């Protein structure tokens, strides 16, 4: 996408006396759902706008924020509350995260039930002893369908860690999960690649993301569908 079609609205949400910035795109008509975006550190005003516009092309509203790991639970509470204020239920809401946000999304699926979740390059082990992000405390009992995509050369997600995650999810989860590893790319494969391998990983990852969301997020009823449902309810009551 060379041109920005929609400029997201910048706003600020409050949390425990601290404000943090967000970007929002709202659509007219009857959107397909809302996608909450957990951005990588320092990326809110970077590539996020392009991703939001790509989602809008497929009928999805979006709300983006950087979610600090140390305040992830409370921050996500605020984002989901904002989703409810915009009229979206949990089954009509998805999450997509990349980099540090990808791990936030993975952890969120173990604590919340909503439509669908996608993580791009979520860290599965720490390469910095001061920022432990391993799977030691991850039970694998996720409540939301989750798709994880990894670069084979990502030092925070080696194939052994991805295999371990698959095993944990396979024994602990009652909902569908899937993992994909892209050869020849690292942890930034979700950005446009400059070579054939990088571009192919970016393109395939984006297509998988859309298909995962479209198959699992419940769309909002159109006005005609709402009228039909109300008529059926009235017919059921009168009979």
Image: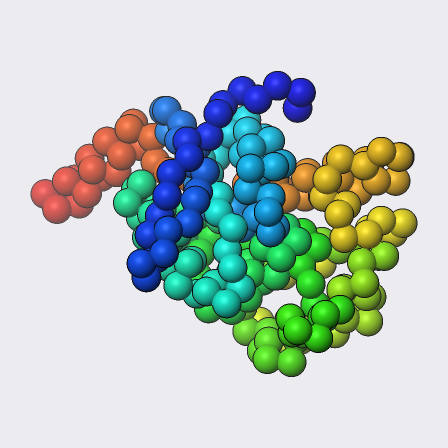
Task: Looking at this view, name the residue that lies furthest to the left.
Answer: 238
- The residue depicted at 55 percent of the width and 37 percent of the height is 45
95 relative to 222, above or below: below
Question: At which x and y percent is residue 20?
Answer: 42, 49
Q: Quadrant of residue 165?
A: bottom right
- The residue depicted at 35 percent of the width and 48 percent of the height is 13
Quadrant (top left, top right, bottom left, bottom right) of the N terminus: top right
Q: Nearer the viewer, residue 30 or 67?
A: 67
Image position of 93 (left or right of 152): left
Q: Nearer the viewer, residue 105 or 101?
A: 101
Task: Looking at this view, name the residue that lies furthest to the bottom.
Answer: 136
- Residue 54 in view in this figure: yes
Q: Quadrant of residue 86?
A: top left
121 relative to 212, above or below: below
Image position of 150 (left or right of 83): right
10 relative to 149, above or below: above
- The residue depicted at 19 percent of the width and 35 percent of the height is 231
Question: At which x and y percent is residue 230?
Answer: 20, 37
Question: At which x and y percent is residue 173?
Answer: 57, 71
- Residue 31 in view in this figure: no
- The residue depicted at 76 percent of the width and 35 percent of the height is 192
């Amino acid at each position: 996408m060379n041109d920005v079609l929609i400029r997201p609205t910048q706003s600020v949400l409050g949390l425990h006396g601290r404000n943090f910035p967000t970007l929002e795109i709202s659509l007219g008509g009857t959107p397909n759902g809302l996608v909450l975006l957990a951005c990588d550190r320092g990326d809110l005003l970077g590539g996020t706008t392009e991703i939001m516009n790509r989602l809008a092309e497929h009928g999805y509203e979006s709300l983006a924020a950087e979610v600090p790991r140390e305040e992830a639970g409370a921050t996500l509470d605020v984002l989901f509350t904002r989703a409810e204020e915009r009229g979206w239920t949990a089954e009509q809401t998805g999450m997509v995260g990349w980099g540090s946000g990808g791990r936030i999304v993975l952890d969120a699926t173990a604590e919340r039930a909503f439509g669908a979740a996608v993580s791009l390059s979520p860290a599965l082990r720490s390469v910095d002893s001061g920022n432990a992000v391993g799977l030691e405390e991850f039970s694998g009992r996720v409540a939301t369908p989750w798709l994880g995509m990894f670069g084979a050369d990502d030092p925070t997600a080696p194939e052994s860690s991805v295999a371990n995650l698959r095993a944990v999810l396979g024994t602990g989860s009652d909902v569908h999960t899937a993992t994909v590893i892209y050869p020849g790319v690292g942890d930034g494969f979700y950005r446009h690649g400059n070579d054939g391998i990088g571009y192919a990983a970016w393109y395939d990852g984006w297509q998988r993301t859309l298909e995962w969301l479209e198959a699992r997020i419940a769309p909002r009823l159109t006005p005609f569908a709402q009228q039909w449902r109300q008529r059926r309810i009235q017919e059921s009551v009168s009979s």
